[in-house]
Image: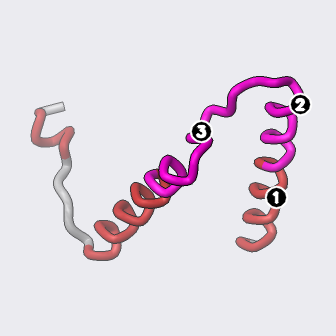
Amino acid sequence: MATYITVLALLTGLVTGALFRFLNIPIPAPPELPGLMGIVGIYLGYKVVEYLDVGVDLLEILGL
């Protein structure tokens, strides 16, 4: 099931990207590899901290 959802997400992205290019609209993502790698880095950092099970509850610290 996860593979199916991943493939659907990829196809949705491909169709959306093609539509943006066809309509000559700038994509809402970094158009260069360094920008894309920055997004991948954010995701990987998130997963590493999740895996290590460390972190703080910022809302609790702020009293919200």
Tell me which segment is drawn in magenta: 14-38
- Packing grade of label 2 (10 A; few <14, some 14-19, many >=20) is few
Residue 43 part of the magenta-drawn span? no
Report the Cα–Cα distance between label 1 and label 3.
Answer: 19 Å
**Disc on res. 8:** 1
What separation in Å lies between label 2 and label 3 (alpha carbons)? 16 Å
Q: Which secondary structure lies at badge 1?
A: helix
Relative placement, left or right, of 54 versus 34 is left
Quarter residue 28 falls in: top right
Q: Give coordinates of residue 52: x percent, y percent.
A: 26, 75
The residue that disc 3 covers is: 29
Depth check, front residue: 18 or 61: 18
Query: Image check: 42 left or right of 11?
Result: left
Is 28 one of the magenta-colored residues? yes
Q: Quadrant of the N terminus?
A: bottom right
| Picture disc at residue 22 | 2
Q: Label 1 amino acid?
A: Leu
Mark pair 1, 2: CA separation: 21 Å
Q: Which badge, 1 or 2, comes first in the chain's sequence? A: 1
